[in-house]
Image (spheres, rainbow, N blue to C red):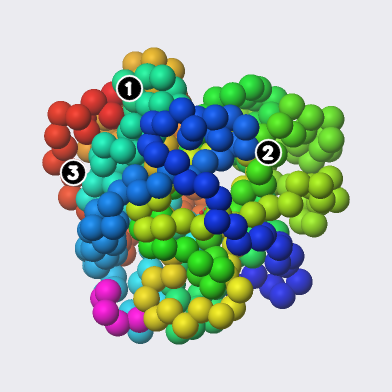
Amino acid sequence: MADPISSPLLHAAYTHVERFEAGSTGSIDHLTEHGFVVIANALTPEQAEHGITLTWDYLEGLGTGIGRDDTCTWHDDRWPINVHGGIIPSQGIGHSQAQWFIRSVPAVKQAFAAVWDDDELLVSFGGMALWRPTAVHAEWQTNRGGSWLHIDQHPIGRPGFHCVQGLVSLLPTSAASGGNVMVPGSHRLFESIPDRYAERLGRIDSSIDHFRFPADDPQLAATPPIMAHMEAGDLLLWDSRTIHCSSPGDGSSTEAGLLRAASLVCMMPDSRSNDKVREQRRDAVAKRVSTTNWSDRFINADKFPVVIEANTARYTLPLVPKLSEDQQAMIG
Ligand SMILES: O=C(O)CCC(=O)C(=O)O
Protein backbone atom coordinates (compact mmCIF):
# COMPACT_ATOMS: atom_id res chain seq x y z
CA MET A 1 0.00 0.00 0.00
CA ALA A 2 1.34 3.47 -0.84
CA ASP A 3 2.70 5.55 2.05
CA PRO A 4 0.76 8.65 3.05
CA ILE A 5 1.87 11.76 1.21
CA SER A 6 3.25 13.12 4.51
CA SER A 7 5.79 10.28 4.63
CA PRO A 8 9.28 11.62 3.85
CA LEU A 9 10.46 11.05 0.30
CA LEU A 10 14.22 10.84 0.94
CA HIS A 11 16.50 12.30 -1.69
CA ALA A 12 19.00 9.64 -2.71
CA ALA A 13 21.22 10.70 -5.60
CA TYR A 14 21.11 8.09 -8.37
CA THR A 15 24.79 7.17 -8.73
CA HIS A 16 26.89 4.98 -11.03
CA VAL A 17 29.36 3.63 -8.48
CA GLU A 18 32.40 1.53 -9.33
CA ARG A 19 31.47 -2.15 -9.80
CA PHE A 20 33.92 -4.84 -8.72
CA GLU A 21 34.70 -8.43 -9.66
CA ALA A 22 33.41 -11.11 -7.26
CA GLY A 23 36.12 -12.12 -4.81
CA SER A 24 38.47 -9.26 -5.74
CA THR A 25 40.59 -7.43 -3.19
CA GLY A 26 39.12 -4.18 -4.51
CA SER A 27 35.61 -5.34 -3.62
CA ILE A 28 36.60 -6.04 -0.03
CA ASP A 29 38.47 -2.74 0.29
CA HIS A 30 35.42 -0.84 -0.97
CA LEU A 31 33.10 -2.73 1.39
CA THR A 32 35.39 -2.03 4.34
CA GLU A 33 35.78 1.65 3.49
CA HIS A 34 32.22 2.54 2.43
CA GLY A 35 30.12 -0.15 4.10
CA PHE A 36 28.79 -1.46 0.78
CA VAL A 37 30.00 -2.63 -2.63
CA VAL A 38 28.46 -3.52 -5.99
CA ILE A 39 29.73 -6.78 -7.51
CA ALA A 40 29.43 -6.72 -11.31
CA ASN A 41 27.60 -9.55 -13.07
CA ALA A 42 27.52 -12.09 -10.26
CA LEU A 43 24.85 -13.56 -12.50
CA THR A 44 25.18 -13.34 -16.27
CA PRO A 45 22.29 -11.56 -18.03
CA GLU A 46 21.01 -15.01 -19.06
CA GLN A 47 21.14 -16.29 -15.48
CA ALA A 48 19.35 -13.15 -14.28
CA GLU A 49 16.64 -13.73 -16.89
CA HIS A 50 16.35 -17.36 -15.79
CA GLY A 51 15.97 -16.09 -12.22
CA ILE A 52 13.03 -13.95 -13.37
CA THR A 53 11.39 -16.93 -15.08
CA LEU A 54 11.76 -19.03 -11.92
CA THR A 55 10.39 -16.14 -9.84
CA TRP A 56 7.23 -16.13 -11.95
CA ASP A 57 7.05 -19.93 -11.62
CA TYR A 58 7.04 -19.41 -7.85
CA LEU A 59 4.36 -16.69 -7.97
CA GLU A 60 2.09 -18.68 -10.28
CA GLY A 61 2.70 -21.83 -8.23
CA LEU A 62 1.20 -20.16 -5.15
CA GLY A 63 -2.15 -21.09 -6.66
CA THR A 64 -3.83 -17.75 -6.02
CA GLY A 65 -4.38 -17.04 -9.70
CA ILE A 66 -1.37 -14.89 -10.54
CA GLY A 67 -0.48 -14.97 -14.25
CA ARG A 68 2.83 -13.48 -15.37
CA ASP A 69 1.32 -11.96 -18.51
CA ASP A 70 -1.74 -10.38 -16.93
CA THR A 71 -1.24 -7.45 -14.56
CA CYS A 72 -4.93 -7.69 -13.61
CA THR A 73 -3.91 -10.76 -11.57
CA TRP A 74 -1.13 -9.01 -9.64
CA HIS A 75 -3.29 -7.32 -7.00
CA ASP A 76 -2.91 -7.86 -3.26
CA ASP A 77 -5.74 -10.41 -3.17
CA ARG A 78 -3.44 -12.81 -5.07
CA TRP A 79 0.06 -11.45 -4.40
CA PRO A 80 2.08 -13.01 -1.57
CA ILE A 81 2.23 -11.14 1.72
CA ASN A 82 4.82 -8.40 1.58
CA VAL A 83 6.39 -6.27 4.25
CA HIS A 84 8.04 -2.84 4.11
CA GLY A 85 9.94 -2.21 0.89
CA GLY A 86 7.83 -4.71 -1.07
CA ILE A 87 9.83 -7.60 0.39
CA ILE A 88 8.14 -10.99 0.24
CA PRO A 89 9.60 -12.74 3.29
CA SER A 90 7.62 -15.98 3.60
CA GLN A 91 5.16 -18.34 1.82
CA GLY A 92 8.04 -20.66 0.94
CA ILE A 93 9.91 -18.07 -1.13
CA GLY A 94 13.18 -18.88 0.68
CA HIS A 95 13.00 -22.38 -0.81
CA SER A 96 11.65 -21.46 -4.22
CA GLN A 97 13.61 -22.74 -7.18
CA ALA A 98 14.37 -19.09 -7.97
CA GLN A 99 16.11 -18.46 -4.65
CA TRP A 100 18.00 -21.76 -4.63
CA PHE A 101 19.13 -21.11 -8.20
CA ILE A 102 20.37 -17.57 -7.51
CA ARG A 103 22.19 -18.39 -4.27
CA SER A 104 23.94 -21.32 -5.98
CA VAL A 105 25.55 -19.33 -8.77
CA PRO A 106 29.31 -19.67 -8.02
CA ALA A 107 30.17 -15.95 -8.21
CA VAL A 108 27.63 -15.20 -5.46
CA LYS A 109 29.38 -17.57 -3.06
CA GLN A 110 32.78 -16.34 -4.27
CA ALA A 111 31.85 -12.77 -3.28
CA PHE A 112 30.86 -13.86 0.25
CA ALA A 113 33.83 -16.24 0.58
CA ALA A 114 36.16 -13.28 0.01
CA VAL A 115 34.36 -11.29 2.72
CA TRP A 116 34.94 -14.02 5.27
CA ASP A 117 38.14 -15.56 3.85
CA ASP A 118 36.26 -18.83 4.30
CA ASP A 119 34.31 -20.91 1.81
CA GLU A 120 32.43 -23.10 4.26
CA LEU A 121 29.37 -20.90 4.29
CA LEU A 122 25.75 -21.28 5.31
CA VAL A 123 23.16 -19.42 3.26
CA SER A 124 20.10 -17.53 4.48
CA PHE A 125 16.67 -18.72 3.33
CA GLY A 126 15.65 -15.17 2.46
CA GLY A 127 12.96 -13.64 0.32
CA MET A 128 12.75 -11.21 -2.57
CA ALA A 129 11.76 -7.61 -3.16
CA LEU A 130 9.32 -7.68 -6.07
CA TRP A 131 7.89 -4.35 -7.17
CA ARG A 132 4.83 -4.17 -9.37
CA PRO A 133 4.64 -1.43 -12.02
CA THR A 134 3.44 1.95 -10.80
CA ALA A 135 2.66 2.97 -14.38
CA VAL A 136 -0.07 0.31 -14.29
CA HIS A 137 -1.34 1.02 -10.77
CA ALA A 138 -0.02 3.99 -8.78
CA GLU A 139 -0.93 2.29 -5.50
CA TRP A 140 1.72 -0.36 -6.19
CA GLN A 141 4.38 2.21 -5.32
CA THR A 142 6.76 0.87 -2.71
CA ASN A 143 7.35 2.59 0.63
CA ARG A 144 9.16 5.90 0.53
CA GLY A 145 12.74 5.54 1.71
CA GLY A 146 12.45 8.09 4.50
CA SER A 147 10.01 5.82 6.29
CA TRP A 148 12.50 3.01 6.92
CA LEU A 149 16.16 4.01 6.87
CA HIS A 150 17.58 1.28 9.08
CA ILE A 151 20.39 -1.00 10.12
CA ASP A 152 19.99 -4.76 10.63
CA GLN A 153 22.10 -5.19 13.75
CA HIS A 154 21.41 -4.16 17.33
CA PRO A 155 24.21 -1.80 18.47
CA ILE A 156 24.22 -3.22 22.02
CA GLY A 157 23.04 -6.80 21.38
CA ARG A 158 25.63 -7.32 18.63
CA PRO A 159 28.47 -4.81 18.90
CA GLY A 160 31.17 -4.83 16.22
CA PHE A 161 31.22 -6.47 12.80
CA HIS A 162 28.89 -9.47 12.39
CA CYS A 163 27.31 -9.76 9.00
CA VAL A 164 27.38 -8.76 5.35
CA GLN A 165 24.01 -8.90 3.62
CA GLY A 166 23.40 -9.04 -0.09
CA LEU A 167 20.90 -8.71 -2.87
CA VAL A 168 21.07 -9.74 -6.49
CA SER A 169 19.22 -7.44 -8.85
CA LEU A 170 17.57 -9.51 -11.57
CA LEU A 171 16.60 -6.38 -13.51
CA PRO A 172 18.64 -3.28 -14.35
CA THR A 173 17.82 -0.35 -12.10
CA SER A 174 17.27 3.28 -13.08
CA ALA A 175 16.18 6.53 -11.46
CA ALA A 176 12.70 5.67 -12.77
CA SER A 177 12.57 2.18 -11.23
CA GLY A 178 13.94 3.18 -7.84
CA GLY A 179 15.85 0.61 -5.83
CA ASN A 180 18.15 0.16 -2.91
CA VAL A 181 19.37 3.17 -0.92
CA MET A 182 22.68 3.23 0.99
CA VAL A 183 24.21 5.82 3.26
CA PRO A 184 27.89 5.40 2.34
CA GLY A 185 30.25 5.20 5.29
CA SER A 186 27.41 5.07 7.82
CA HIS A 187 28.67 1.79 9.31
CA ARG A 188 31.09 4.07 11.15
CA LEU A 189 28.20 5.70 13.05
CA PHE A 190 27.20 2.35 14.55
CA GLU A 191 29.30 2.59 17.73
CA SER A 192 27.81 5.98 18.56
CA ILE A 193 24.14 4.93 18.19
CA PRO A 194 23.62 4.03 21.89
CA ASP A 195 24.66 7.58 22.83
CA ARG A 196 23.04 9.42 19.94
CA TYR A 197 19.71 7.58 20.05
CA ALA A 198 19.53 6.41 23.68
CA GLU A 199 15.76 6.77 24.11
CA ARG A 200 14.84 5.32 20.72
CA LEU A 201 17.23 2.38 21.07
CA GLY A 202 16.04 1.79 24.64
CA ARG A 203 12.63 0.83 23.24
CA ILE A 204 14.11 -2.03 21.22
CA ASP A 205 14.96 -5.36 22.79
CA SER A 206 18.66 -6.14 22.35
CA SER A 207 17.77 -9.39 20.55
CA ILE A 208 16.05 -7.45 17.73
CA ASP A 209 18.51 -6.79 14.92
CA HIS A 210 16.61 -3.92 13.34
CA PHE A 211 16.86 -0.24 14.22
CA ARG A 212 15.06 2.48 12.26
CA PHE A 213 16.29 6.04 12.13
CA PRO A 214 13.93 8.97 12.57
CA ALA A 215 12.55 10.42 9.34
CA ASP A 216 14.56 13.44 8.15
CA ASP A 217 17.10 12.76 10.88
CA PRO A 218 19.31 15.90 11.25
CA GLN A 219 22.11 13.65 12.52
CA LEU A 220 22.32 12.08 9.04
CA ALA A 221 22.43 15.39 7.17
CA ALA A 222 26.21 15.15 6.71
CA THR A 223 26.03 11.69 5.14
CA PRO A 224 23.76 11.91 2.06
CA PRO A 225 22.19 8.67 0.79
CA ILE A 226 22.73 7.30 -2.69
CA MET A 227 20.82 4.91 -4.93
CA ALA A 228 23.52 2.84 -6.64
CA HIS A 229 22.91 1.82 -10.23
CA MET A 230 22.82 -1.94 -10.76
CA GLU A 231 22.88 -3.96 -13.94
CA ALA A 232 20.82 -7.15 -14.18
CA GLY A 233 22.82 -9.81 -12.32
CA ASP A 234 24.79 -7.39 -10.11
CA LEU A 235 25.16 -8.26 -6.44
CA LEU A 236 25.05 -5.54 -3.80
CA LEU A 237 26.82 -6.36 -0.54
CA TRP A 238 26.54 -4.29 2.61
CA ASP A 239 27.66 -4.45 6.19
CA SER A 240 24.56 -4.91 8.42
CA ARG A 241 25.70 -1.78 10.30
CA THR A 242 25.40 0.40 7.18
CA ILE A 243 22.24 2.50 7.09
CA HIS A 244 20.06 1.48 4.16
CA CYS A 245 16.52 1.03 2.82
CA SER A 246 14.88 1.11 -0.59
CA SER A 247 12.87 3.85 -2.21
CA PRO A 248 10.57 4.35 -5.20
CA GLY A 249 11.67 5.83 -8.51
CA ASP A 250 11.25 9.40 -9.68
CA GLY A 251 7.74 8.89 -11.05
CA SER A 252 8.76 8.75 -14.72
CA SER A 253 8.53 4.97 -15.19
CA THR A 254 6.45 3.67 -18.09
CA GLU A 255 7.39 0.04 -17.36
CA ALA A 256 4.47 -2.37 -17.63
CA GLY A 257 6.26 -5.39 -16.13
CA LEU A 258 8.02 -5.85 -12.79
CA LEU A 259 9.81 -2.65 -11.76
CA ARG A 260 12.25 -4.39 -9.48
CA ALA A 261 13.18 -7.98 -8.70
CA ALA A 262 15.86 -8.31 -6.05
CA SER A 263 16.85 -11.59 -4.44
CA LEU A 264 17.98 -11.27 -0.83
CA VAL A 265 20.96 -13.52 -0.15
CA CYS A 266 23.35 -13.69 2.76
CA MET A 267 26.13 -16.12 3.62
CA MET A 268 27.97 -16.50 6.92
CA PRO A 269 30.64 -19.00 7.97
CA ASP A 270 29.42 -22.39 9.12
CA SER A 271 31.82 -21.98 12.06
CA ARG A 272 29.64 -19.14 13.41
CA SER A 273 26.62 -21.43 13.63
CA ASN A 274 25.94 -24.34 15.99
CA ASP A 275 24.31 -27.77 15.96
CA LYS A 276 20.93 -26.59 17.24
CA VAL A 277 20.71 -23.94 14.52
CA ARG A 278 21.87 -26.41 11.85
CA GLU A 279 19.10 -28.80 12.91
CA GLN A 280 16.50 -26.00 12.75
CA ARG A 281 17.80 -25.09 9.30
CA ARG A 282 17.48 -28.66 7.98
CA ASP A 283 13.94 -28.78 9.33
CA ALA A 284 13.22 -25.41 7.69
CA VAL A 285 14.14 -26.81 4.27
CA ALA A 286 11.80 -29.78 4.74
CA LYS A 287 8.99 -27.45 5.87
CA ARG A 288 9.94 -24.64 3.45
CA VAL A 289 10.28 -22.09 6.20
CA SER A 290 12.01 -18.86 5.16
CA THR A 291 14.44 -16.92 7.37
CA THR A 292 16.02 -13.50 7.72
CA ASN A 293 19.65 -12.91 6.74
CA TRP A 294 21.21 -14.55 9.81
CA SER A 295 22.52 -18.11 9.70
CA ASP A 296 24.33 -18.06 13.06
CA ARG A 297 20.89 -18.06 14.70
CA PHE A 298 17.50 -19.18 13.47
CA ILE A 299 15.03 -16.37 12.78
CA ASN A 300 11.82 -17.72 11.26
CA ALA A 301 10.34 -15.22 8.80
CA ASP A 302 7.03 -17.12 8.76
CA LYS A 303 6.61 -15.85 12.32
CA PHE A 304 6.69 -12.17 11.36
CA PRO A 305 3.53 -10.60 12.89
CA VAL A 306 2.21 -9.49 9.49
CA VAL A 307 2.49 -13.08 8.21
CA ILE A 308 0.86 -14.61 11.29
CA GLU A 309 -2.06 -12.20 10.98
CA ALA A 310 -2.63 -12.99 7.29
CA ASN A 311 -4.70 -15.75 5.71
CA THR A 312 -1.78 -17.96 4.74
CA ALA A 313 -3.86 -21.08 4.04
CA ARG A 314 -4.65 -19.81 0.55
CA TYR A 315 -1.03 -20.10 -0.60
CA THR A 316 0.41 -23.35 -1.95
CA LEU A 317 4.03 -23.77 -0.86
CA PRO A 318 6.67 -24.72 -3.42
CA LEU A 319 7.77 -28.37 -3.41
CA VAL A 320 10.58 -29.43 -1.07
CA PRO A 321 13.68 -28.42 -3.07
CA LYS A 322 15.85 -31.14 -4.62
CA LEU A 323 19.35 -29.98 -3.74
CA SER A 324 22.83 -30.83 -4.95
CA GLU A 325 25.60 -31.74 -2.51
CA ASP A 326 26.97 -28.19 -2.69
CA GLN A 327 23.56 -26.75 -1.91
CA GLN A 328 23.05 -29.16 0.99
CA ALA A 329 26.39 -28.07 2.42
CA MET A 330 25.02 -24.51 2.53
CA ILE A 331 22.18 -25.68 4.83
CA GLY A 332 24.56 -27.04 7.50
O1 LIG B 1 15.31 -3.93 -0.83
C1 LIG B 1 16.31 -3.33 -0.47
O2 LIG B 1 17.08 -2.81 -1.25
C2 LIG B 1 16.58 -3.19 1.02
C3 LIG B 1 16.61 -4.51 1.69
C4 LIG B 1 16.78 -4.37 3.14
O3 LIG B 1 16.63 -3.33 3.71
C5 LIG B 1 17.18 -5.51 3.93
O4 LIG B 1 17.22 -6.64 3.43
O5 LIG B 1 17.49 -5.30 5.12
Label whose residue precedes the other's in the sequence (1 or 2): 1
Question: Which residue lies under the disc numbered 3?
Answer: 321
Task: Kindly report the distance in space between the C-alpha atoms of the residues bearing marks 2 and 3.
Answer: 38 Å
Q: Which residues are magenta?
A: 67-71
Q: Nearer the viewer, residue 140 or 186?
A: 186
Secondary structure of the residue carrying tag 1 is loop
What residue sits right under mark 2 in the picture? 185
Query: Residue 141's spot in the image, x, y percent?
Result: 55, 73
Vertical order, 323 against 259 (above or below): above
Residue that label 1 marks: 119
* Residue 33 percent coordinates (x, y): 62, 32
In the foreground, 7 or 248: 248
* Residue at horizontal 26 percent and vertical 37 percent from the top: 106
The residue at the point 33 percent across, 32 percent down is 110
Mark 1–mark 2 Cα distance, whole angstroms, equals: 27 Å
| 172 shown above or below 299 | below
Residue at 30% in and 41% down? 103
Q: Quadrant of residue 291?
A: top left
The residue at 58%/30% (across/down) is: 32
User: For residue 185, what is the image quadrant?
Assistant: top right
* Residue 120: percent from left, percent from top: 31, 21
Q: Quadrant for the N terminus, please.
A: bottom right
Which quarter of the rendering shows the C terminus?
top left
Mark 3 element type? loop
Residue 234 seen anywhere in this rendered image of the structure: yes
